[in-house]
Image (cartoon, rainbow, N blue to C red):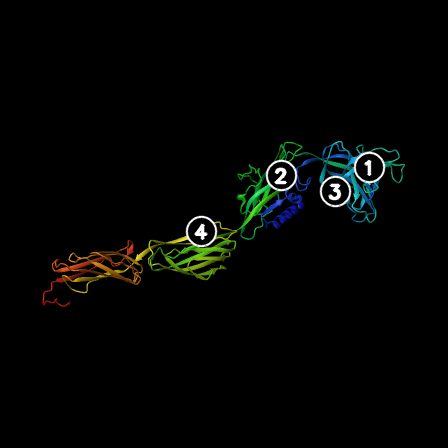
Amino acid sequence: MKLWLVAIAAALSAAASGANGACMTDTQQSDFQAGLARNVDVNVTPGSVVLTKSFAVDQENTAVTAFGTPFTTTKWVGQTFTPGLSGLLTRVDLNFFCVSCPATPPTIVVSLRATSAGLPTGADLATATVPIVNGPQKFYSAIFPAPASVTQGVKYAVVVRPSTNPATGQIGFTRSGENSAGGDVYAGGDLINSANAGAAWNVQTFNNVDPTKQVTDAVFMTYIHGGYSPSGELQSAALDSNPPAGVSPSWTSLSWNSTAPAGTLLRFQAAASDSAGGPFVFTGPDQTAATFFDTPGVALPQFDGKRYLKYRAVFSSTSSTATPTLTDVTACFSTTATANLSISNSDGVASANAGSVAVYSITAANAGPANVTGAKVTDLFPAPLSCTWTCNGVGGGACTPEGWGNINDSINLPAGASANYIAVCSIATTATGSLANNASIATPVGVDDPTPADNSVTDTDSLSVNTNVTMSVSNDSNFVRVGDPVVYLIEVTNAGGPSDAVISVFDALPAQLGQGQWECLGSGSASCSGGSGNTLTDMATVPAGGKIDYLFSAVLLSESGNGQITNSASASLQFGTNQPSGIINASDTDTIVVFEDGFEPPPVP
């Protein structure tokens, strides 16, 4: 149990150290050893995972006696043997002793070699290093990190030598005995030695000190890796994305490299949790335990936001001689800061007057959990508005203190902070229809907003056109004489507005008048037109406080009309204009006189 906890802790530490990158890869023997293995082997081929094979003692000579053959860095010893099984030679147990050696003797190098004519030849096929202790005879296991294959019936040699010579004492390889009668204890091989560090070998038949005594074989056992298990699985240690505060990982892919010979299958499932201790529920593509991922490079969006990920590799084989082989697994992720940004925008009213002032309160806020640097607040004020604005940061928020025109501001908002804008906007006197003002906040790159719907808001007001238009008509006389020109002054005034008045002016001259014409003069930025004919029709624009004056003139041709002439003018406003005085019109009535010699009209009262 203690070793299992140590392995988990090591795996989590390794995963965390790599969490600054985009991917974490299990490819070393230690990576796979950190997980939980069932009927799979992560040691027989370091760096790969395969189904387990049965381990069987194949060849052995276990008759331990008090006799042994000393060996040094130049005087090597060994034992030849003939496998009864074909497979991987994963382990050899040997019996050593170390007499009067230091407290920590040198390690023993054990290797496997091929043979020729019953003696070792060629390079080492597999090598293991075995630590020993000072003391009497004892069995030691030489486990080969990279086992070599051996073939049934073919002779091989186990070669033994120390890494260095002990400072004191002597190391020996235990034999089954020696006697004058001889006798072969192990029939499949022989005790061998070399006086020149493995350059040349001999079968040791007699004791080197007493040639009258024959020696027997060394004490040993060989282990062969047999047939593969039909199924197994590897559950990885928890892979830690280790995100910064306020950042949630997105698991973008799970990939692996493997081989699967005919009759074998390798499939995957995955699980995630907010805790390294789980729970981890392994699922496949449909997020149930009944399905598996069969193709590398799968995305895992169902686990987004979870800090820890595990994979489960499921091995199966219908052949005892074949296994899938897993060489590496890579889990990739991206880390995105999560911050709930929002913005509000209101001028506090539902309607506004053209020519008045609108005051907008715009607040950008960050509900966290991550701090945000470089969020963009934008308000492109619509054309009828002319604005200046100020900004105040709250709770650590930072924004541009003031500006004019549109807001296009980069702000910093720690979690819980806000930036409050006050925009004072003049509404054009010509504005009509409605006023729609949109404010928005945009997250910077690397920040994810889980509720983007509240990142934009529009305040809409209906616009009212309010005018105070008056009209007057006068020719500055109470009497007119046939044959004289008559000049009417038609005044149209927008007193105080506050909106611009778009006015249609109409005046049809009385029938007593001949061909007329008019001129117009605008003041206070008012605009109007001139023309000719007995009907004045003009579309004029009169801003708040502005006025237009028409001079409409024609000659009086007739005294008909019961001795009077009346000129009536009227004005109508653009649809939707609010006008307090209601109907806008005015008229002027004069007496028609016929001048005779010596007659003067009475004075104007």
User: Crowding at label 2, few (<14), some or many (≥20) Cα neighbours within 10 Å?
Assistant: some
Amino acid found under the numbered disc labelled 4 = Asp
Instruction: Give the crowd class for mark 1: few <14, some 14-19, many >=20 residues within 10 Å.
Output: many
Element type at marker 2?
A: strand
With respect to residue 279, does 481 lie above or below? below
Q: Look at the numbered discs 3 and 1 and tell me whether their residues touch, using CB distance below 8 Å.
A: no
Pointer 1 residue: 191
Disc 1 and disc 4 in contact, CB within 8 angstroms:
no
- Work out how far the residue at label 2 is from the one at label 4, CA to CA, in angstroms: 47 Å
The percent coordinates of residue 516 (x first, y second) are 20, 58
| Type of amino acid under label 1 | Leu
Query: Who is closer to the viewer here, 295 or 134?
Result: 295
Pointers 2 and 1 in contact (CB under 8 A)?
Answer: no
Q: Identify which residue, 194 or 384, lies in the foreground.
A: 384
Sequence-first disc among 2 and 4: 2
Q: Earlier in the sequence, mark 3 or mark 4?
A: 3
Check the picture and name the quadrant holding the C terminus: bottom left
Q: Earlier in the sequence, mark 1 or mark 4?
A: 1
- What label sits on residue 454 in the rendered view? 4
Identity, as a three-letter code, of the amino acid under mark 3: Ala
Q: Is residue 500 left or right of residue 488?
A: right
Rounded to the nearest angstrom, the CA distance separating label 3 from label 1 is: 20 Å
Residue 312 shows in the view: yes
Residue at label 2?
258
**Is there CB contact under 8 Å for labels 2 and 3?**
no
Other-residue count near label 3 (Cα within 10 Å), few / some / many at <14 / 14–19 / ≥20: some
Q: Position of residue 555 (x, y in %)?
A: 17, 60
